[in-house]
Amino acid sequence: MDTLIPYDSLTKETLENILDDIVSREGTDYGNYELSALQKREQALRVLQTGEAVLLFDTESETITMVSKSALDNNDLM
């Protein structure tokens, strides 16, 4: 079961650590341009702030992922 984590309820340090982990995962696609880790983190934060994506905690694997809000709204997850 997945639990929604409001990104703004996390401390700045915790959120940065989570985003660093997410953007460093193999297979994360950022398009045709190579971005620095900081740029990737800032990009991930922007999509959270705009509401385009949300953070989910998977209780089985005990991992946090970032998913598009549209996928969540379409019940493609959870």
Image (cartoon, helix red, strand yellow):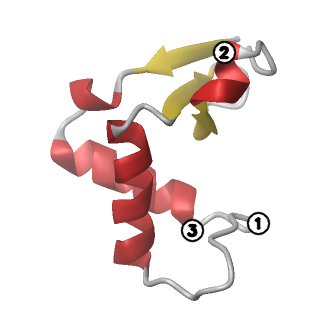
Is the residue marked by circle 3 packed among few (<14), some (14-19), or many (20+) residues within 10 Å? few
Which mark, by number, is residue 74? none
Say which of 50 and 57 sits in front: 50
Marks 2 and 3: CB-CB under 8 Å?
A: no
In the image, residue 59 above or below residue 49: above
In the image, residue 30 above or below residue 33: above
Query: What secondary structure is marked by label 1?
Result: loop
> Residue 46: horizontal and vertical position, in percent?
35, 51
Type of the residue with mark 1: Gly
Pointer 1 residue: 27
Say which of 36 and 50 sits in front: 50
Q: Quadrant of residue 17?
A: bottom left
Which mark, by number, is residue 24? 3
Q: Quadrant of residue 26?
A: bottom right
Q: Residue at x 28, y 44 (%)?
A: 14
Q: Quadrant of the C terminus?
A: top right
Q: Residue at x 50, y 36 (%)?
A: 52
N-term-proximal mark, 1 vs 2: 1
